[in-house]
Amino acid sequence: MRSSVILVQGALEDVMLFGEECYKPSETFKCQKCGKMYRYKGNLQAHLKFECGKKPSLQCPHCSYRAKQRSNFKGHIALRHFKPIDL
């Protein structure tokens, strides 16, 4: 489990989370079609399956915004079209 304790040793570039070195991969994975880089092979595989060379499949019902990823689509709806109720 990753800890959220921060170690600071002088300059900003020396700031790191304890245990971070255990999770940081030593290689990167590059998409041969578009050149995007990923830290994890699974993220590259998802990119190839759902995103690379494909048009955005999620259309906003309120405007012309389109997204390839559901999280970006939901964030757009929440930020652009959600109207808070005054209590």
Image (spheres, rainbow, N blue to C red):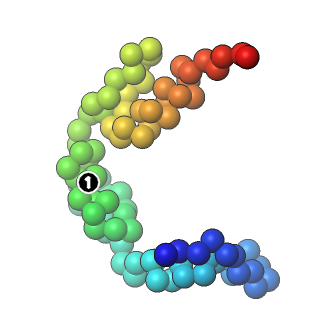
Return the residue found at the far left: 49
Q: Residue at image x 73%, y 74%?
A: 12
- The residue under the point 49% across, 30% down is 76
Q: Is residue 74 left or right of residue 8?
A: left
Q: In the figure, is residue 18 to the left or right of 30?
A: right
Kindly indicate the quadrant of the structure image that contains residue 82. top right
Q: Which residue is mark 1?
A: 46
37, 39: nearer the viewer? 39
* Relative image position of residue 32 (x, y in whole percent): 23, 60
- Quarter of the image that includes the C terminus: top right
Q: Look at the image and tell me whether residue 8 can be seen.
A: yes
The picture places residue 24, in percent across and down from the top left corner, at: 45, 77
- Residue 9 image offset from top left, x and y in percent: 76, 85
What's the residue at 42%, 40% (across, down)? 71
The answer to whether residue 31 shows anywhere in this view is no
Give the residue drawn at x 27%, y 44%.
Answer: 51
**Disc 1: CA contacts within 10 A as few (<14), some (14-19) or many (>=20):** few
Mark 1 element type: helix
Q: Is residue 38 above or below residue 28?
A: above
Type of residue at label 1?
Ala
